[in-house]
Each structure stands twice: as C-alpha cells, then as structure tokens.
Image (cartoon, helix red, strand yellow):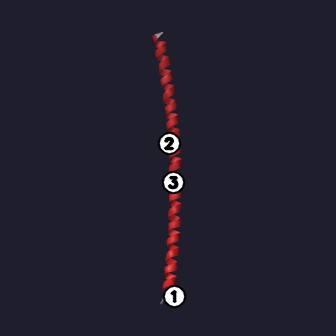
C-alpha cells in the first residue's frame, strides 16, 4: 500500500517535471523568436541609418561644390 502511494507520487512528480521541461522549452523558443525579431529590427535600423547618413553626406558634398 505504502509502496503504491510512493510510486503514484513519483509518477506524478515525474509528469510535473516533464510538463515543466516542456513549458520551459516553449518559453525559451518564444524568447529566441523575440530576440531574433529585435535583432532583425536593429539591423534594419542600422541599414536605414547608414542610407540616411550617405544621403546627408552626398547633399553636403553637392552643396559644397555649388558654393565653391
């Protein structure tokens, strides 16, 4: 009787442990997806900033040529 209760508790604890592992895995995957999304946005922002800087440099060079 006591052994059956112990085994049932052990099975329940094992089940809960696996559920926790699965939940942790899902949370990790969600976090990875968020980080990848943020990283993509950051790269896009950097590229846009580079283009804007290049455009500004070109305008300054054009203005400089006109004022010489």
Q: Which numbered mark, 2 or 3, is in the foreground of this view?
A: 3
Q: Are marks 2 and 1 in contact (CB under 8 Å)?
A: no
Q: Which mark is residue 3?
A: none
**Front-most of residues 38 and 66:** 66
- In three-dimensional space, the C-alpha distance between marks 2 and 1, rounded to whole angstroms, equals 57 Å
Above-or-below relation of 57 to 41 = below
How would you rate the neighbour count of disc 1 (Cα within 10 Å): few for under 14, some for 14-19, many for 20 or more?
A: few
Whichever of labels 1 and 3 marks the residue nearer the N terminus, that label is 3
Above-or-below relation of 40 to 10 = below
- In three-dimensional space, the C-alpha distance between marks 1 and 3, rounded to whole angstroms, equals 42 Å
Q: Which numbered mark, 2 or 1, is in the foreground of this view?
A: 1
Residue 42, image x and y in percent? 50, 58
* Residue at the disc numbered 1: 66
* Residue ID at (49%, 80%): 60
How would you rate the neighbour count of disc 3 (Cα within 10 Å): few for under 14, some for 14-19, many for 20 or more?
A: few
Above-or-below relation of 53 to 27 = below
How would you rate the neighbour count of disc 2 (Cα within 10 Å): few for under 14, some for 14-19, many for 20 or more?
A: few
Q: Secondary structure at mark 3?
A: helix
* Residue ID at (52%, 70%): 52
* Residue at the disc numbered 2: 28
Residue 38, image x and y in percent? 51, 54
Q: Are marks 1 and 3 in contact (CB under 8 Å)?
A: no
Q: Secondary structure at mark 2?
A: helix
* Residue at the disc numbered 3: 38
Whichever of labels 2 and 3 marks the residue nearer the N terminus, that label is 2
* Residue ID at (48%, 85%): 64
* Residue ID at (48%, 19%): 9
Whichever of labels 2 and 1 marks the residue nearer the N terminus, that label is 2
């Amino acid at each position: 009787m006591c052994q059956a209760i112990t085994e049932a508790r052990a099975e329940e604890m094992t089940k809960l442990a696996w559920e926790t592992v699965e939940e942790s895995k899902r949370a990790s995957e969600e976090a990875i997806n968020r980080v990848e999304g943020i990283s993509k946005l950051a790269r896009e922002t950097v590229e846009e900033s580079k283009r804007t800087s290049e455009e500004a440099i070109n305008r300054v060079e054009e203005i400089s040529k006109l004022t010489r």
